[in-house]
Amino acid sequence: MRYPSLLLLLLSGCNLVKGPPRDHECRSTLRQIIGLEFAYYSERNAYSVHPVAIGFAPNQGNRYLYLFAPEGQLTRRDELASPPLGESVGYGPDSKKRNVLLEDLLLKLPPDLRAATGLRGTCPDCDLTIACVANLDDDPDVDVWTISTKDRPEAARGTPIHHLKDL
């Protein structure tokens, strides 16, 4: 076969015209976050709901809101004021590039999924669930994924679960 790399790209759901699927950002970033959380836990016997504590910040142009806890202030990616990084429990989407506000995404996040985020238990016997939320196509629906440090009925620990599809 002359073009094995092209065939692999097409079979993986990626094409040269559109690029990777839009939800790829969320899945890959959640895997990055959970890896950082596992490393943090191995050093401190605890997880953190503060992204800066584990060394996480999303790339420029992020389309997803990353939520580490059900309550608390989030770091904004626009001109409005943000809390100090050490107090933030997540990051909003890059509103300058994506034209969506984190408040809009929080309103569309189902309450049960928001309540499922955050730290449960007392460390070292604790677990953490993190969510990402986006509106990928400007309709009323949102795309929601979660990842957890514990095994869940739908997936093993460290595996993202897709709760709501936007596309």
Image (tube, helix red, strand yellow):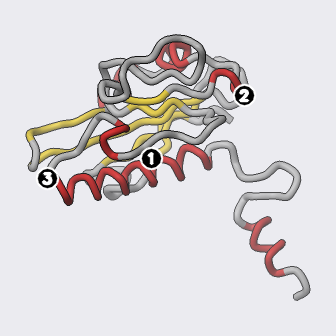
At numbered mark 1, what does the secondary structure look like: helix, strand or loop?
A: strand
**Could you tell me if residue 152 is visible in this image?**
no
Neighbourhood count class around disc 2 (C-alpha, 10 Å): few under 14, some 14–19, many 20 upward: few
Split into 4 quadrants, where in the image is the N terminus? bottom right
Q: Which residue is nearer to you in this view: 113 or 28?
A: 28
Instruction: Point out which mark residue 45 bears.
Output: 3
Rendered location of residue 28, percent (x, y) = 53, 52
**Could you tell me if residue 87 is visible in this image?**
yes
N-term mark: 2 or 1: 2
Q: Which residue is nearer to you in this view: 33 or 22?
A: 33
Rendered location of residue 4, percent (x, y) = 81, 81
Split into 4 quadrants, where in the image is the C terminus? top right
Rendered location of residue 78, percent (x, y) = 59, 19
Q: What residue type is labelled 3?
A: Asn
Say whether residue 50 is left or right of residue 16: left
Q: In which quarter of the image is residue 89?
A: top left
Q: Distance between the residues labelled 2 and 1?
A: 20 Å
Rendered location of residue 44, percent (x, y) = 16, 52
Q: How far apart are marks 3 and 2 (CA)?
A: 40 Å
Q: What residue type is labelled 1?
A: Ile
Neighbourhood count class around disc 1 (C-alpha, 10 Å): few under 14, some 14–19, many 20 upward: some
Q: Residue furthest bottom?
A: 1
**Disc 2 designates what residue?**
137
At numbered mark 3, what does the secondary structure look like: helix, strand or loop?
A: loop
- Which residue is drawn at the image coordinates 31% and 50% (left, top)? 37
- Which residue is drawn at the image coordinates 72% and 58% (left, top)? 13
Instruction: Point out which mark residue 161 bears.
Output: 1
